[in-house]
């Protein structure tokens, strides 16, 4: 149900996410004009979703206010939509993205070691070699699908490198990740939804088991990799439990894989559709790639939404929220807010400032992997456009139906 002001828009209905992106942006623009955030009712599906309904935050100011104010806008019990039922965390353990401080702060403190400038510096050589191999294969194989030949290959490779996953286990990791990312929470039929959710859970459990086994080995015989660092105590005596290690690996694969790959796939299409921007980027790659990546993340908003639960009475732009109310932060809508971005529908790699919320709003959950994502995209695009300057997307991307990931299933390309 929506208010009478925007009766044709229902963000809780799968049909909305089937509409072409341009139409969705028009709908969000209409919602941004309304005086208050609008409430959307959700259907309850037994075993799969709890369905309480939510207020949609679509203005940049509202998304940043909720992100900043994590005491009122809690990430517990979960930030995904539809909200998973309570039993899920008993099976999988909990992920830091679904926690509040102090539990969240403790985990973030431990795992942030993986994302320090020194650790990211150590990864650079591996990222360069992987990007070069991917382009070697593209040259050998010829044009085809940009997602499977390029975008899908790098992020998962980097996460495995980071964790120190041995080569022989990587094929299994790829297989489980493919299954676990095929389910996006929105599926046409209930039966299909339940079947895919089941497969997704088994794949996630297998990934967790794999890394826990590795963690036990590394605890006995530590190496220089992240798993060793996470299972052996740091200076403050902090380390991850086995269950936390499993949940963290699953989170990295879910958070760090699709997002970076979708940014690259949409990015190639954006640079093809905006030849002047492409020319500008190639005229001085180092000067413009930073701005280009931020603009891709703003324009694409690879994660379209995250949810929060209100913990206390609070007034948000005249709307009175009560404990237990849900709000959903629509990053894609905030990133096109005309009061913050001039001509928000224009792709402009020189946009400055560019205070997008594609990596989340300012607050404790701001994307831990933002710098790693930037590093991957920069390295991949440098390799691609240096060796294949004629690289271009062909035709339209095949998008995956999702209310969460702005996901590209395939994108033809040529060079
Ligand atoms: C373009 C690529 C990416 C985008 C757009 C993106 C987006 C986001 C967003 C919007 C959040 C905020 C969650 C919230 O507020 O509840 C987030 C959190 C997170 N991201 Fe990313 N992400 C990207 C790449 C990555 C990569 C490469 C990794 C790691 C390999 C990663 C790891 C994480 C983690 C661990 C969190 C949870 C942080 C916390 O709860 O404290 N992300 N990301």
Image: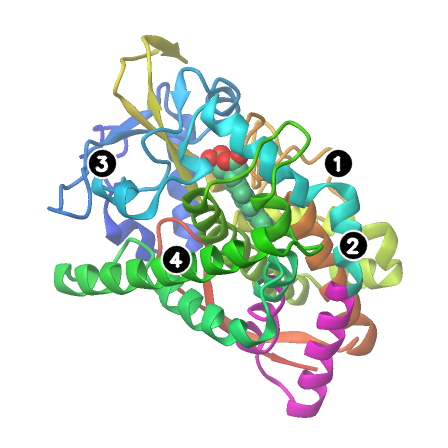
Q: Secondary structure at mark 2?
A: helix
Number of the label disc, if any, that sits on residue 352: 1
Number of the label disc, if any, that sits on residue 132: none
Q: Quadrant of residue 230?
A: top right
User: In terms of sequence position, does the residue under pointer 2 or pointer 1 come before the other?
Assistant: 2
Q: Give the residue at x 80% y 63%.
A: 125
> For disc 3, does the CB lie below 8 Å from ligand 1?
no
Residue 143 within the magenta-colored segment of the rendering: yes
Residue under numbered circle 3: 7
User: In terms of sequence position, does the residue under pointer 2 or pointer 3 come before the other?
Assistant: 3
Residues at circles 4 and 3 in contact by the CB criterion of under 8 Å:
no
Residues at circles 4 and 2 in contact by the CB criterion of under 8 Å:
no
53 up-or-down from 88: above or below: above
Would residue 326 be found to the left or right of residue 190 on screen?
A: right
382 up-or-down from 286: above or below: below
Residues at circles 1 and 4 in contact by the CB criterion of under 8 Å:
no
Would residue 1 be found to the left or right of residue 39 on screen?
A: left
Q: Give the residue at x 55% y 76%.
A: 168
For the residues labelled 2 and 3, the Cα–Cα distance comes to 52 Å
User: In terms of sequence position, does the residue under pointer 4 or pointer 2 come before the other?
Assistant: 4
Within-10-Å neighbours for mark 2: few <14, some 14–19, many 20+: few
Image quarter hosting the C terminus: bottom right
Residue under numbered circle 4: 20
Discs 2/3, front: 2
Residue under numbered circle 2: 122
Quarter for ligand 1? top right
The location of residue 117, given as percent across then percent down, is: 77, 42
For the residues labelled 4 and 3, the Cα–Cα distance comes to 18 Å
């Amino acid at each position: 149900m929506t208010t009478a002001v925007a009766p044709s828009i229902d963000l809780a209905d799968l049909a909305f996410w089937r509409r072409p992106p341009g139409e969705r942006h028009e709908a969000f623009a209409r919602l941004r004009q309304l005086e208050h955030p609008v409430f959307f009712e959700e259907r309850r599906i037994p075993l799969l979703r709890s369905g309480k309904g939510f207020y949609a935050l679509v203005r940049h100011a509202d998304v940043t206010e909720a992100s900043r104010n994590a005491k009122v806008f809690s990430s517990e019990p979960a930030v995904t939509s539809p909200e998973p039922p309570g039993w899920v965390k008993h099976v999988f353990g909990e992920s830091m993205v679904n926690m509040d401080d102090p539990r969240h702060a403790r985990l973030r403190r431990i795992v942030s070691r993986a994302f320090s400038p020194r650790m990211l510096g150590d990864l650079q050589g591996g990222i360069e070699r992987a990007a070069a191999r991917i382009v070697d294969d593209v040259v050998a194989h010829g044009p085809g699908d940009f997602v499977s030949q390029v975008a899908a290959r790098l992020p998962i490779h980097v996460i495995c490198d980071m964790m120190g996953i041995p080569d022989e286990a990587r094929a299994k990791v790829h297989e489980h990740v493919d299954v676990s990312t095929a389910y996006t929470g929105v599926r046409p039929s209930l039966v299909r939804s339940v079947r895919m959710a089941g497969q997704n859970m088994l794949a996630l459990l297998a990934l967790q088991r794999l890394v826990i086994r590795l963690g036990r080995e590394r605890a006995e015989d530590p190496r220089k990799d992240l798993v060793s660092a996470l299972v052996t105590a740091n200076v403050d005596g902090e380390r991850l439990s086995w269950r936390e290690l499993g949940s963290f690996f699953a989170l990295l694969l879910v958070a760090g894989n699709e997002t970076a790959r979708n940014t690259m796939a949409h990015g190639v299409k954006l640079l093809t559709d905006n030849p002047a921007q492409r020319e500008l980027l190639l005229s001085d790659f180092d000067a413009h790639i930073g701005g280009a990546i931020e603009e891709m993340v703003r324009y694409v908003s690879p994660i379209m939404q995250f949810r929060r639960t209100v913990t206390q009475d609070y007034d948000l732009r005249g709307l009175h929220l009560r404990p237990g109310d849900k709000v959903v932060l629509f990053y894609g809508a905030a990133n096109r807010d005309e009061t913050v971005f001039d001509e928000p529908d224009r792709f402009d790699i020189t946009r400055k400032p560019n205070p997008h919320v594609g990596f989340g709003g300012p607050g404790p959950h701001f994307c831990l992997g933002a710098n790693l994502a930037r590093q991957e995209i920069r390295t991949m695009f440098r390799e691609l456009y240096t060796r294949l300057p004629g690289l271009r997307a062909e035709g339209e991307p095949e998008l995956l139906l999702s209310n969460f990931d702005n996901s590209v299933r395939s994108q033809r390309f040529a060079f």
